[in-house]
Image (cartoon, rainbow, N blue to C red):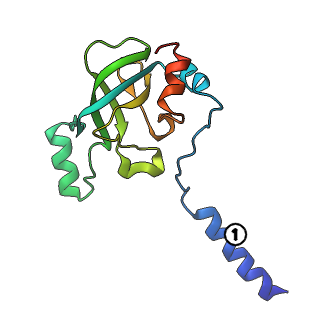
């Protein structure tokens, strides 16, 4: 009986001390209308540019972390700029700038946007006025479903 308890106790300790796994889990919508209802901005557009967000840390902070050997990328966020063809929800003037985690962080819902063809972009506004998106806010339905939901042809 004791031989059984030792492995059980070790397994329990290991399970309790393991770091929490990070995984992206997205809500699925039944219709394009439902997905658009929770968004602040929905538009059809095409990627113009995508670039990593600039490091906003001070030079002193970056140097200190570099010497300590703990310097990690300052940000995992990407800024993608879109040419907007038509706005389906919300207001946008000119090109749209969307902040998001890059696709290499897909376990944290990071996403990259396809280049070349027009896509539906669904975004949310933050308290500082930026629009953000993620893997979970990518279009789940054909373009026509969003056009019909917006009552636009």
Looking at the rendered image, the quarter that the N terminus falls into is bottom right
Q: Residue furthest right?
A: 1
Residue drawn at x 46%, y 41% as measured from the top left: 135
Residue 76, image x, y percentages: 32, 44
Residue drawn at x 28%, y 52% as measured from the top left: 72
- Left or right: 15 as drawn, with respect to 65: right
Who is closer to the viewer here, 142 or 72?
A: 142
- Left or right: 39 as drawn, with respect to 119: right
Residue drawn at x 49%, y 34% as measured from the top left: 139
**Figure label count:** 1
Who is closer to the viewer here, 73 or 82?
A: 82
Q: Which residue is mark 1?
A: 12
Who is closer to the viewer here, 60 or 110?
A: 110
Residue 115, image x, y percentages: 29, 40
> How packed is label 1: few (under 14 Cα within 10 Å), some, or many (20 or more)?
few
Work out whether 97 lies above or below 109.
above
- SS class, disc 1: helix
Residue drawn at x 40%, y 43% as measured from the top left: 111
Residue 34, image x, y percentages: 61, 24
Work out whether 148 lies above or below 108.
above
């Amino acid at each position: 009986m004791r031989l059984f308890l030792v492995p059980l106790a070790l397994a329990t300790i290991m399970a309790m001390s393991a770091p929490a796994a990070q995984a992206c889990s997205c809500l699925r919508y039944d219709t394009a209308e439902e997905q658009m209802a929770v968004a602040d901005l929905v538009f059809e557009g095409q990627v113009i540019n995508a670039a990593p967000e600039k490091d906003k840390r001070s030079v002193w902070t970056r140097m200190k972390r570099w010497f300590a050997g703990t310097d990690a990328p300052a940000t995992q966020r990407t800024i993608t700029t879109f040419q907007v063809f038509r706005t389906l929800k919300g207001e946008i003037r000119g090109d749209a700038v969307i902040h998001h985690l890059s696709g290499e962080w897909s376990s944290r819902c990071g996403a990259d946007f396809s280049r070349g063809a027009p896509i539906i972009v669904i975004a949310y506004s933050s308290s500082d006025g930026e629009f953000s998106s993620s893997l979970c806010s990518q279009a789940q339905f054909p373009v026509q479903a969003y056009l019909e939901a917006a009552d636009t042809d």
